[in-house]
Image (tube, rainbow, N blue to C red):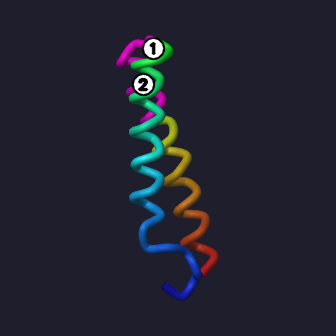
Amino acid sequence: MSNGKSPYADVVVFLAVLIAGVVLVAVAHVPVGAIAEFAVGLSALYMAYRQKDDSGS
């Protein structure tokens, strides 16, 4: 990759969101529906970041 980013960045982000969801459900007893909304919001932010990053190259 010419932009210096790791090819595993998407996997790391996916696992971070997955682990955060599991921790919130298991430890904080957050409803699963709220976790789904959290994941959708984070994915929208990540896609906006990726589009901004891709347009700069």
Circle nearer the N terminus (1, 2): 1
Image: 1 above or below 47: below
Disc 2: which residue? 35
- Spot occupied by residue 5 in the image (x, y as percentages of width and height): 55, 75
Does residue 33 belong to the magenta stretch? Answer: yes
Q: In the figure, is residue 3 to the left or right of 32?
A: right
What residue type is disc 2 on?
Ile
What residue type is disc 1 on?
Val
Disc 1: CA contacts within 10 A as few (<14), some (14-19) or many (>=20): some
In this view of the protein, which residue sits in the foreground, 50 or 27?
Answer: 27
Labels 1, 2: front one: 1
Q: In the figure, is residue 21 to the left or right of 50?
A: left
- Spot occupied by residue 4 in the image (x, y as percentages of width and height): 58, 81
Disc 2: CA contacts within 10 A as few (<14), some (14-19) or many (>=20): some
Question: Residue drawn at (58%, 57%), measured in percent from left and top?
Answer: 49
Question: Residue drawn at (41%, 19%), measured in percent from left and top?
Answer: 25
Question: Residue drawn at (54%, 88%), measured in percent from left and top?
Answer: 2
Q: Which residues are magenta?
A: 29-40
Question: Cβ–Cβ below 8 Å for labels 1 and 2?
Answer: yes
Disc 1: which residue? 30
Q: Main secondary structure of the magenta part?
A: helix
Spot the residue most to the front. Answer: 27
